Amino acid sequence: MQSEASTNRQWVFLRNPEGAVTPDIFEWREAAIPEPAPGQVLIRNRMLSIDPANRAWMRGRTYREQVMPGDVMHGYTLGEVVASTVDDFKPGDVVEADGGWQD
């Protein structure tokens, strides 16, 4: 197993719930943390908003795209810039993003 510093922990959406949202509609995965490409910023999520709207995103398009099976579960986040190839963002900056249910 990789160390936490090199692993991105994720909750991946598997299928639409029938009835209550239960843990089996998600899958826990670990993936390597990518290096930011030109024009990208790498963010470590520090806070995740989990809202009733999450269920609506599983069922169809709302004010945003539908979460599809295989996607990291969508969610708004506050995070810290870890690495950046963008002049306007430096490591340590706090940003808001649609970072999803992952590190």
Image (cartoon, grey):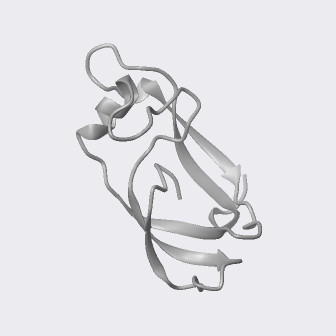
Give percent across and percent down for residue 56: 30, 31
Q: On the rendered structure, is 49 left or right of 73?
A: left
Q: On the rendered structure, is 26 left or right of 89?
A: left
Give percent across and percent down for residue 75: 40, 49
- In terms of image quadrants, where is residue 90? bottom right
- Tell me: residue 89, above or below residue 45: below
In-front residue for pair 70/62: 62
Give percent across and percent down for residue 21: 31, 26
The residue that appears at 61% across and 41% down in the rendered structure is: 29
- Tell me: residue 92, above or below residue 47: below
- Tell me: residue 4, above or below residue 27: below
In-front residue for pair 2/93: 93
Residue reaching furthest to the left: 52
Give percent across and percent down for residue 8: 62, 56
The residue that appears at 44% across and 25% down in the rendered structure is: 25
The total number of labels drawn is 0
- Tell me: residue 56, above or below residue 30: above
In-front residue for pair 39/6: 39
Q: On the rendered structure, is 38 left or right of 81?
A: right
The residue that appears at 72% across and 52% down in the rendered structure is: 1
The residue that appears at 39% across and 41% down in the rendered structure is: 64
